[in-house]
């Protein structure tokens, strides 16, 4: 009995030491992935997550990215060397992370990213640059055309004035034709330079034509039905804001009860409005709908939105 | 009278508590999602934090550490009541800032358009006055046209909902320009009961 108790005590001590050892082993092995290292004390877990994420990014960039493939496929020896340096930096950063030296790992990652960027700059992605220039060409064309239309409307508003009072039309036409021709030859860089000149000329002309003017966008409707349709859209806009408000607010917010009350009242008023509209009383329908929109406005005001 | 005063004090206290609760809950929500209600209603101590703690820049990046802190760089600029608390239009007018119009050409000048657009709105809310001048002194026409707004009367359906959701004016206002909570800076043309403007458009046009 006495011996058994002694064995029991020793078994307990061994079990505690073993458990501690297993835990230490587990932690040391785990440090390879995301947990704590054996040396230098345990840095914050967030640092590990951050460095792991950066390492993953750099690893993908130097080993699997289209940039790495493009550099490898090129004949630029200097870029090849830089890519090799970036890969080495990634390996060093991984080793430093595994050893628990986060600062050194960060330094290596930074160096790797900078080296990779330098290598990438040496081997231009011709396809991407061409696509971007092509997109810019389309954007610039749209810009020139929309401003040209706006300019023509502005001149039409001015009796006795003509386009040539504000704009050298021949010059702009020439620039547009030249740009089009250059685009056909796939020289989008030069084509875009021509379009920028044309856009600037048209915008300058428009600013001269509209100088010190005030344009009023009146809120006029062709019929009460049009106004009803407008008011429905306005009400829906406020409902969108209420949905956003409910989504962002904590559920415990007591103001939500008030908001909900206003929402229910709006729904009732909208239903009444719709019934009146179907009966042909559009003016009464409009009044009900506006009351509903006012309810939503009150709810939004109560929730801190300024009106 | 005394009873009325007590009621008023209680009401004001309750209102203040609600307002404080709003600010705190707004701050909590803001931490989770920057595109939210009242995200600009920060107490003074939390306004314009340095780049390393603003939640926008990479706090470990070299750039974030080398950038000048807003509180330092904004110190001498004219003040405003919201956003990043700088009156940028006044700063531009006073020559306190000289934004470069072209990245590569320091001599390039902007094409300034002095055109006001008035948008009539329903209800008692004043009409909106949009001044092109103050916008084009800093921005290029192509920053807004035609991608955000078609340069054509009646072609753009606008609503406060879409603006608050970060579209149309909300692409900049509430992010890099004064927030939309400053209603009267845009809704500046006051109307009478019949809806007729009572203030001259030009005088009411504010940036």
Image (spheres, coloured by chain):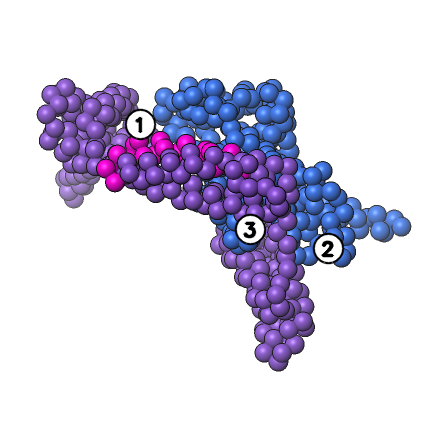
Tell which chain the image draws in purple: A
Name the residue: 10% across, 25% down.
Answer: A75
Disc 3 is attached to a residue of which chain?
Answer: B
Q: Which residues are magenta?
A: A184-207
Is-magenta flag for residue A195? yes
Residue drawn 70% across and 45% down? B189
Q: Position of residue A240 (x, y in %)?
A: 52, 57
Question: Taking A12 as reference, is B94 above or below it?
Answer: above
Residue in the foreground of this view, choosing between A86 and A174: A174
Label ID, residue A43:
1
- Quick check: A103 left or right of B169? left
Shade representing chain B:
blue
Look at mark 2 in the image and give the residue it sits on.
B195
Do the residues at pointers 2 and 1 share their chain? no
Nearer to us of marks 3 and 1 is 3
Mark 2 or 3, nearer chain start = 3
Percent coordinates x, y for residue A128 in the rendering: 24, 36
Which element type, helix, strand or loop, lies under badge 1?
loop
How much space separates mark 2 and mark 3, taking CA atoms? 21 Å
Frontmost of labels 2 and 3 is: 3
Q: Residue at image x 62%, y 25%?
A: B93
Up/down of A23 relative to B36, above or below = above
């Amino acid at each position: 009995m006495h011996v058994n108790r002694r064995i029991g005590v020793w078994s307990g001590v061994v079990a505690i030491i073993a458990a501690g050892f297993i835990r230490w082993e587990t932690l040391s092995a785990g440090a390879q992935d995301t947990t704590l290292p054996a040396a230098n004390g345990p840095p914050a877990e967030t640092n590990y997550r951050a460095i792991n994420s950066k390492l993953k990014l750099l690893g993908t960039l130097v080993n699997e990215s289209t940039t790495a493939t493009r550099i490898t496929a090129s004949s630029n020896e200097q870029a090849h060397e830089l890519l090799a340096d970036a890969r080495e930096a990634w390996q060093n950063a991984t080793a430093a992370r595994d050893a628990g030296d986060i600062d050194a790992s960060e330094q290596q990652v930074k160096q790797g990213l900078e080296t990779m960027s330098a290598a990438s700059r040496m081997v231009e992605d011709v396809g991407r640059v061409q696509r971007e220039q092509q997109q810019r060409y389309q954007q610039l064309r749209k810009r020139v055309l929309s401003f040209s239309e706006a300019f023509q409307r502005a001149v039409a508003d001015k009796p006795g004035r003509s386009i040539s009072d504000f704009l050298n039309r021949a010059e702009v036409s020439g620039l547009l034709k030249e740009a089009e021709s250059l685009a056909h030859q796939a020289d989008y860089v030069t084509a875009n330079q021509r379009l920028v000149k044309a856009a600037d000329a048209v915008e300058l002309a428009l600013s001269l034509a509209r100088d010190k003017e005030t344009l009023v966008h009146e809120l006029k409707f062709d019929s009460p039905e049009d106004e009803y349709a407008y008011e429905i859209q306005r009400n829906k806009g406020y409902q969108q804001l209420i949905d956003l408000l409910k989504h962002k607010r904590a559920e415990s917010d007591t103001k939500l009860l008030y908001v909900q009350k206003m929402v229910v009242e709006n729904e009732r008023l909208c239903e009444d409005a719709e019934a009146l509209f179907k009966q042909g009383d559009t003016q009464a329908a409009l009044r009900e709908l506006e009351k509903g929109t006012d309810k939503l406005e009150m709810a939004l005001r109560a929730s801190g939105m300024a009106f | 009278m005394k009873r009325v005063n007590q009621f008023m004090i209680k009401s004001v206290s309750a209102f203040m508590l609600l307002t404080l609760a709003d600010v705190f809950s707004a701050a909590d929500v803001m931490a989770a999602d920057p595109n939210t209600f009242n995200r600009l209603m920060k107490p003074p101590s939390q306004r314009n934090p340095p780049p390393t703690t603003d939640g926008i820049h990479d706090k470990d990046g070299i750039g974030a550490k080398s950038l000048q802190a807003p509180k330092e760089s904004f110190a001498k600029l004219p003040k405003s009541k919201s956003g990043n608390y700088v009156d940028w239009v006044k700063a531009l007018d006073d020559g306190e800032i000289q934004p470069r119009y072209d990245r590569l050409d320091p001599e390039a000048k902007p094409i300034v358009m002095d055109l006001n657009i008035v948008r009539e709105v329903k209800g008692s809310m004043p009409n909106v006055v949009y001044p092109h001048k103050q916008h084009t002194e800093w921005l290029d026409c192509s920053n807004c046209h035609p991608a955000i707004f078609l340069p054509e009367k009646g072609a753009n359906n606008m609503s406060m909902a879409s603006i608050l959701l970060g579209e149309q004016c909300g692409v900049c206002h509430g992010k890099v320009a004064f927030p939309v909570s400053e209603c009267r800076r845009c809704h500046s043309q006051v109307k009478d009961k019949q809806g007729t403007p009572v203030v001259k458009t030009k005088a009411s046009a504010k940036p």
